[in-house]
Image (cartoon, rainbow, N blue to C red):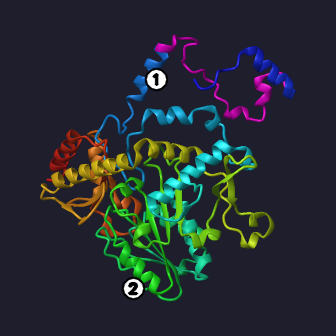
Amino acid sequence: MRYLPHNDDIRWQMLKEIGVNSIEELFSAIPKSAIQKNKYRLDKHREEFLVAEHLSQLADKNLSSKNIPFFLGAGAYNHHIPASIDHLIQRSEWLTAYTPYQPEISQGTLQALFEFQTQVAELTKMDIANASMYDGSTASAEAALMARRITKRNKLIISGGLHPHYIEVIKTYIDNDDELIITQANPLAKDDLTKNLDENVAAIIVQTPSFFGSLYDIKYLAQKAHERGTLLIVVITEIISLGLLEAPGILGADIVVAEGQSLGNPLNFGGPYLGLLATRDKFMRQIPGRLCGQTIDAAGRRSFTLTLSTREQHIRREKATSNICTNAGLCALAFSIHLTLLGAKGLVRLAKLNHLRARQLATMLSKNKNIKLLNKNFFNEISVQLNKPAIRVVENLLKKNILAGVPAQRLIPHDENMQNILILAATELTKQTHIEELCLALEEELL
């Protein structure tokens, strides 16, 4: 246990201090109709090892990536997390640290955020990165607002290959849907993002690898965008892909946003995750959130400080950028520790292993005449077209304890072309036996 429970004497002192005489009086505001009257059938006391064994047996009844074939991806990926990461972030100085409102006294927190920014900038090959964003979807929306501030234009061209949830978040941030040009979702990454490009477009927003796993020609898009004075925003949901793919900063991106969950952060029911945002030096004043910088103190020692924060939030609100001060600090720390443990060579090896697993999956699936591989290029995620509705196939395979991927129509429900498309991800944790089990089950299901 991370925190010791209170005994009866301590509870009584706490109740006395706040002026109540019992636990019941403390919670008297709760309606009696909402209180559970039946007692739970739990022993008052059991040995710790017996309780742990019982809870472990209950947990084993859950379907998870640890005990069944698991091919879910679509923005959140199943990767190994070294045990040392959880140990380090549970240290009290990290676990209880909060955003530095009086920043210079929080040197440890500032240094961690400074190192995080440095790693993100190096990964993306951009000049600067902030510290940090809530998640990939809100980071994408913030990048869209940032592009509009920089260019003084309102229109945005959004690739249909951008994760559907990210598109919805951008729609929530942008009041006028007429200012959003969203291309038709295309698993082959063939949607034409330059067709509607003119002098009124603030940015092109493209995800690579896309929601369907395919790669876009970022260099070409950057060239076409810059000819019109338009910015290029590149979104990455699988950050480990940058261990193998050329960084978007080298290819001409103006703003890069990403979801950092794949490094240091386990799969969970919606998070918490963390968003990454990096850009060019010349756009520094338009980034949301904060920048941590390195300096020296009065004694000449290395120290850290907030070099840029949205002070306009307090004095000129109409000119303020988003004040993301309660950043995803603990998730960012886990990200940085994992990346530090990997190192540059380790990240490359991990990326290659992910791609290898995806190639093995694609090769075996392609042997089935009822399955058509839709990607010409990919990293660790692929899309296939089945001869039956993908939602029904996934539900049937779930009965066999196989999590067979994400049916595209679940996230793009109004597009009938998505009905038979299944998106599958493979990572370093994907076993060859699980690939074989999936392929055998699909052979039977697609007859």
Alpha carbon distance from label 2 to label 1: 57 Å
Specify start and end residues of the magenta stretch as a single range: 20-49
Question: In the image, what residue type sits under mark 2?
Answer: Lys
User: Residue 417, position in %: x, y?
Assistant: 30, 69
Q: Nearer the viewer, residue 251 or 357?
A: 251
Left or right: where does residue 18 sit relative to residue 219? right
Q: Nearer the viewer, residue 99 or 207?
A: 99
Q: Is residue 289 visible?
A: yes
Q: Earlier in the sequence, mark 2 or mark 1?
A: 1
Helix, strand or loop under label 2:
loop
Of discs 2 and 1, which sits in the foreground? 2
Would you place residue 375 above or below residue 401 in this image? below
Depth check: 399 or 299 in front?
A: 299
Instruction: Please provide percent x and percent y for residue 41.
Output: 54, 18
Residue at x 45% of width, y 63% of height:
125
Q: Nearer the viewer, residue 389 or 180?
A: 180
Q: In the rendered view, tell whether residue 394 sits above or below residue 195.
A: above
Instruction: Kindly indicate the quadrant of the structure image that contains residue 342.
Output: top left
Which quarter of the image is occupied by the N terminus? top right
Tell me which amino acid carries mark 1: Leu
Q: Main secondary structure of the magenta part?
A: loop
Identify the residue position indicated by label 1 in the image. 55
Residue identifier under label 2: 195
